[in-house]
Each structure stands twice: as structure tokens, then as C-alpha cells.
Amino acid sequence: MRKLLSLTLTGLAATPALAGEMTVTVEIPRLDVAEYHRPYLAAWIEQNDQAIANLTVRYDVKMRDNEGTKWLKDMRQWWRRSGRDQTFPMDGVSGPTLPVGEHKLSFDTAKGPLAGLKPGAYALVVEAAREVGGRELLRIPFEWPAKAGFAQSVKGESELGTIALAIKP
Amino acid sequence: MKSLLARTGIAIALIAGMALPAAAHRTWMLPSATVLSGQDPWITVDAAVSNDLFYFEHVPLRLDGLQVLAPDGSEGKAENQATGKYRSTFDVHLDKPGTYKVAMASGGLMAFWEEGGQRKRWRGTAEAFAKEVPANAEKLQVTENFRRMEFFATAGKPTDAVLKPTGKGLEMVPVTHPNDLFAGENATFQFVLDGKPAPDLEVSVIPGGIRYRNDLGEMKLKTDKDGKVTVKWPTPGMYWMEAELEDNKTSVKQAAKRRASYNTTLEVLAQ
């Protein structure tokens, strides 16, 4: 009897009406270069030149002695807004670099740093820096709370393909 | 008579030549980077006396009095020091998180006089002056000089401890952190003389890379009543910021003039 009750309660908590979702789609472009390295990448929510929430930070986590952190500063806007205040790895945020292709990253807007997001104007910022390559930064502004079915995308020119933001409030 | 005048003339020329070699050339330190991430980063630094920024074409800067101040106030090390034909180099291990200050500063009195037809030269502090320079020295000429050259580098999160002035000579107290500079943005710096704000001071800011353009690109600024200047960075790159002044507030009455100079190398990143 008890087991059934707890299952029902769990079922209730998972209804979409209570938990929103923010989906960030990142396209790592295929580049025709002799020496290719997957880019370092950071995606964060920004307001008035302040990083409000880190969504993901991708770097070479496999290097010995955390040596991959040496090039985090090449994501120079992310570094000054947030990176330099962090210790690495960043729990629940950092991970290995992404391969070429499209990657959908989903974030529960009722949990973590997105949970306390106050109403206002924000921007999703995505910055990529590639070894022996270039660096690119893209922004998608959005309002919070977001209108139902909000979807916006921008296309990079060099180090990033299409970056899309979709918010299901 | 003529020879005495000539000798005095030489003495004056010597003073002029030794007091401000920077008047003829620029002296600078150029760090390989000022914004660092990673476990325990290193930087390498070039130090030279040259006209150009930041190219070596004259003489190396001697590394006497080179000081590395770590974020916690302790003394760091300038390692692998070497002096070559046009530049000196050294490495700094930023093994503590925070902002480092690397500086060469010197200051004090210089005196010339004649003793039994011999030209005498002396360097030292105001305290030593009374003891070591004869009270009735012939043809006594005394000058007072302060020189400071420095730069800042940060491993990880910027800190403030090393930004405090020592209170001696001409110094720069950053209002905008010197390792948080970006093209298109404003940065404010305060100049202090013996720890007090230096108003109406002329400050010169020159971007590096002079060789590859026509215009010097010098920004001439003046400090306000609080000793502050605001620079708007036109482009990313390394910049040389310099100020010098002359007054008569000497620490011994035999010195008629006091000269103080300051320069720093600042890195401005792209947006």
C-alpha cells in the first residue's frame, strides 16, 4: 500500500506544469584543418555583464594533473565573468570536449541556478576556443519568464555552427 | 678657470645623463601573459631599454633590484635570469592564486662634488647623506630620483593586496584591476606621489607595435584632482603607460630638484 502511494507522489512531481526546461543546442562545426582539436566551450546565462548561471564548460578533462585547465582562459569572456572564480572540475557543470555534430543540452529550470532566476532580460552566451584555431562568441537574448514555445537561434561563422535556445516554461 | 668650468660642465652632463636615461629611451618589461589559468602557470618576461615598443633594439635592462611580490605579500622569485645583447629575460612561477606584482624600483640621492681637484660621486639615502657627504663639499650638486617600473599578472581570480602603494616615489594605484582590461572599455588608474594623490600629472599611454604603423598612437592624459586618469582602450594589445614629474620637495636641502618616474606595461584583451 505504501509503495503505491510513493509512486503516485513521484508521478505528480514529474508533471511538466511544475518543471520547465531550457534546451541549448550546440553545433560543433566540421572544420577542414590539418590539425584538428575539439574546441573548449562554455555556455552561461548572463545579465548586466554578470554570469548568473553556468550551464556547461567543456575542456580537456583527461590531461594529467588537471593540466587541461591551462587553456580555460582562452575563453576570455567566460573566464572574466565566471571561470576565474571557479575550481575545476566544476561539479555538475564541466565535462569533456564535444565532438563535431549537434548536441542538445537540457536544463531543468526548477533546479540549480536556473531555479532562482528573477524576472528580467538575460542572454545565453556560448563561447568556443580551439587549439591552433580561433575563438567565437555568440549571444541569444531572452526574457524571463519566457513566453511559451520560445525558440531562437544564431549561426556562428567559424568556431561555432548553429546555437539554438528553446525554453518551455 | 676654463678647465674648471669644463669639468663642472662634464659633471652636470654626467648628472643629466645618469639621472634620467629614460628621457632618451623607454625602459620596459614585457610579460608573456598577464591573465593566466591552470594549475600553476608560468610567465616569461623581457626587459629592455629601447625606443620602440615593444621591440628590442638598444640595450638590455639590468635586473638589479628586481622584485616579485606574490598575492599573499610574500616575496616570489625571478628565475632563469639572463642578460643578452638587447634584452634581459626571466621567468616567474605563479604558484599562488591571485595577482602578482613584478617591479624594479629605486630611489634616493645622488651627489657630486670636488675634493682636492678630484670629482667625487655618491649615491645613498637621506639618512646616509648627512654622514657620508662632507658638509663643506666643494661644488656640491645633489639630485633626488625615484624610478618605478612594474607590471601585474594574475593566476586565476584577481586579488588586491599587491595593488597597494608603498608610499615612496611616484606610484600607480589601479582603480580598475590591471588584469581585467578589454578593448573598447574604460579603465581608471590613480597616481600617487609619496602615497598622496598626484593631480595635474601628465600621463602617456602608448600601444605596442609602433613598427607596423605610421602614427605613434600616443594618448596624452592628465590626472584629475584625485590623481586619476581614465583610459579608453582603442584596440587589444600591450600598452606602455608612463608618467614623470619634477618638483622641489626634496628630502635634503642641498638637493634643488626631485625627479620621479613611473611606467607599467598593461595587457588589453579583445572582447
Image (tube, helix red, strand yellow):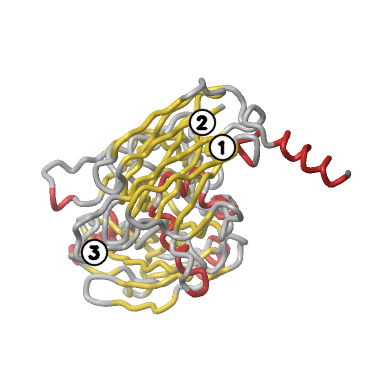
Q: Residues within 10 Å of mark 1 (few under 14, many from 20)?
A: some
Do marks 3 and 1 both belong to one polypeptide chain? no
Q: Can residue B10 be seen in this snapshot? A: yes
Residue B69 vs A123, above or below: the answer is below
Q: Nearer the viewer, residue B98 or A166?
A: A166
> What is the quadrant of residue B235 in the picture?
top left
Q: Residues within 10 Å of mark 3 (few under 14, many from 20)?
A: few
Question: Label 3 is placed on what type of residue?
Answer: Ile
* Residue annotated with mark 3: B10
Assign a secondary structure to mark 1. strand
Assign a secondary structure to mark 3. helix
Residue B48 vs A29, above or below: the answer is below
Q: Nearer the viewer, residue A114 or B102?
A: A114
- Name the residue furthest right: A1
Residue at image position (74%, 40%) is A10
Question: Label 1 is placed on what type of residue?
Answer: Ile
Res A47 label: 2
Foreground mark, 3 or 2, reads 2
